[in-house]
Amino acid sequence: MDGHYKKIRSILAWVLVLNWAVAFAKIIYGFWTRSSSLTADGFHSLADGLSNVIGLIGITLASQPKDADHPYGHKKYETLFSLGIGAFLFFLSFSLIKEGIGRFISPVIPTVDAGSFIVLLTTLLVNFIVMSYEYKQGKLLKSDILISDSMHTRADILTSISVICALIAVKLGYPVIDPIVTLLIAVFIARTGFEIVREASRVLTDTIVITNTKRIEKIVLSVNGVKTCHKIRTRGRGDDIHIDLHVQVSPQMHVDNAHKISCEIEDAIKKSISGVTDIIIHIEPIEQ
């Protein structure tokens, strides 16, 4: 488990360095050319870096071992801190909406040159590589933080493409497109924030994790001695799934055998379904 979180921290640290390198390149060039859409895209990348910091803090807390006050562990801290990433995105979206409206009231014609496109295309390539790698590792490690952060970077890619379109429009003589794209970027960011909050809320409110309960039932019924299986419930995260269920056995069965069946059921489920960490089995006699 320590190695699991160490790998996640390492990925976040490298992504943080790349995100802030991309952010400062966009912000500096955006201010220099007076492009609100390019500057907005830069601050979006800066928020990517801030979300990495949040993720590092969350992972540090989530990696703590079980203790007397947290007998189920601290893994949900990772999910909780992913909400912080969502909150940052909502705040950034609001700020960019103000910026875009301000540019309508007080128009500023940005300078568009070859350097603007070079900066955007280079950072776009970096973001695509980061997003693909982080999302793949997030799925592999079943990390809410990495998946949420990669979604954040995905939004950054979409906004960078929008900024390129805006700069082309400005070059063609339509500077009003620049603040319009800034507002569109704000919408993209808010939508990504909503997706992150929605997914985190599903975990924190104990939404069902395994929708196909028939799969669990089939595994349980394969254990010798089990008559029926019902009241199957699941909750938790992809890497920390909790299951509780009721199993009916013969009323003449000795408690030792019932206990043995419970252990066999637990082993069978954990071998068949990855991410399951805790199973509560209620043994009851089948009605004659």
Image (cartoon, helix red, strand yellow):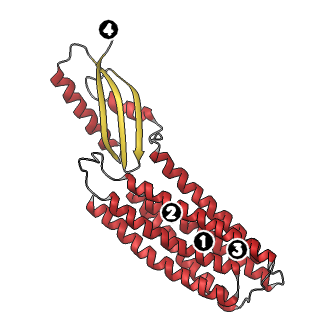
- Using the image, tell me which numbered label, if any, was put on residue 99: 3
- Using the image, tell me which numbered label, if any, was put on residue 157: 1
- Which marked residue is nearer to the observer: mark 4 or mark 3? 3
| Residue placed under numbered mark 2 in the picture | 85
Q: Position of residue 70 (x, y in %)?
A: 29, 48
The answer for how far apart the CA atoms under marks 3 and 2 are is 21 Å
Q: Nearer the viewer, residue 26 or 288?
A: 26
| Residue placed under numbered mark 4 in the picture | 288
Q: Quick check: 173 left or right of 283? A: right
Q: Are marks 3 and 2 in contact (CB under 8 Å)?
A: no
Q: Secondary structure at mark 1?
A: helix
Task: Work out which residue is located at the far top of the displayed protein and give it.
Answer: 288
Q: Amino acid at mark 4?
A: Gln
Q: Are marks 2 and 4 in contact (CB under 8 Å)?
A: no
| Residue pictured at 53% horizontal, 78% vertical | 126
Sequence-wise, the earlier of marks 1 and 2 is: 2
- Which marked residue is nearer to the observer: mark 4 or mark 1? 1
